[in-house]
Image (cartoon, rainbow, N blue to C red):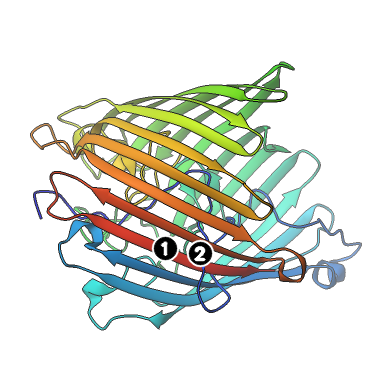
Amino acid sequence: MKNIKIHRVNGIRAVLITSAMVLCGAVHAADTGESPSGEENFAVNMGEMFSKGQIEGNARAIYFHSQNAYYVPGLNQDTASIGGKLGFRSARYNGFSFGLSGFLQRPLHRSSDPAKVDGYIGPDITAMGEAYVRWENADTRVTVGNQALELPFAATYDWRMAPQLFQGVSARYGLSDDNYITAVRMTRFKSYIDNNFKKLTTYTSNVDPYSPIGRTESNGFYGVGGVKSIDFQSMLFKGQAWYFGYLDYAKLTYAEAQLSAQGEGIKPFVAAQVFRETGDGRKLLGNIDSKVYGAQVGAKRNSVTFSVSYDRIVPKSDSYLNGALVTPYSHNVGSGPLFAQPFLSSTQDLGAGNAYAVDLNGSPAPGWFIGARYSYMDLKSSAAAPSLRQSEYLGYAIYHFSGKWKGLSITDFIAWAKSPVQDARFWQNRLAMEYKW
């Protein structure tokens, strides 16, 4: 293998990763404390908070097969795990409710050689998940405790057995997904392979074995932002803006806007995004001076969406990873809101330069969602490094059962990547199944 670090990363925007195996289980829609699932139950006394509450959960089985895993020649991995979630969400009494959940992951097939075990689904997990108290009225929601978030670069990324979760306080005004403002202060974090909430991030060695900072603790993050939509009848505008302070890492400002046609037939859209990030506090990863600009054009007809995406990560030789974004809660996990992103790696973890992607997806029949993506990462991890020039081809299919099998879904994602600076071509198949109730 040539001079490049192995990345155990994964990312796909706005697609939930769920796949098939022999048992009930796998990966599906993200559980989010921002948007409780199901119908809301109301209690007239505290006892009814329990009697009218809902038990919810999922059973999952996930199988990952890799050849030349993470570009290591001859390294093949076969890993299968079963597990899932069991949770309880109370009814609401005088605006108050609470939620609890736990997660379990156990091996179904795992090699005795650690190098041949996938790092996502290989570890045993027995974890307390959500444990929150919430107050809510018609316009406002405040949540305190262990909770799921769906924020740019700080989300559940719930395509594994256990989602990422956060400990702290979140407040949201406006319960419509098209118009709201959110503020958060999170002090601890539980990754998808950890059992407990800690003052660590995805850059620390519990998640990243190549971490330059070991298990150095930090005090979480704060953030504020929101989404605004304006209906112009023939056109729809949707914008969002966010500010995050990742304590002792970085301060990030992000804005995005999309204008799309409405009506019948083909509906074109255009979007733009911008990111600006500088260092914060102890600057655990060193100097940070990152600028990213993105553009996207596409069209939608019925369920079919086609898009062409581009992101320019401005090279900066004295900044972390040549000017790449620092994302303490999605490093080696996902590319967040970046327009151009691969599947087997995350854009912000590859360096600076130009990133491109072409996507086509849609629902050809009831219950089906299929898609394909090509991405090209012309990125350099340092000013002196060669460009990665990574080409990746992705195909996927998701099927949601109906009728008496409602709640069951199966998915298969297959990706193949190559780079002239790597000695092998990386191929991976992710197959899973979930039954959700």
Task: From the viewer's perspective, tell me whether residue 70 is left or right of residue 14.
Answer: left
Q: Write down the quadrant of residue 250 in the picture.
A: top left
Residue depicted at x 52% and y 55%: 397
Image coordinates for residue 125, horizontal then vertical, percent: 44, 75
The residue most toward the front is: 364
Instruction: Give the residue number, with chain letter if any, for mark 2.
Output: 19
Give 44 or 374, whichever is nearer the viewer: 374
Secondary structure found at label 1: strand
Q: Write down the quadrant of residue 140 in the picture.
A: top right
Task: From the viewer's perspective, tell me whether residue 206 is left or right of residue 4.
Answer: right
State how far apart marks 1 and 2 are (Cα).
7 Å
Q: Are marks 1 and 2 in contact (CB under 8 Å)?
A: yes
Which disc is residue 430 wearing?
1
Give 271 or 314, whichever is nearer the viewer: 271
Give 220 or 407, whichever is nearer the viewer: 407
Tag 1: residue type?
Arg
> From the image, which quarter does the N terminus lie in?
bottom left
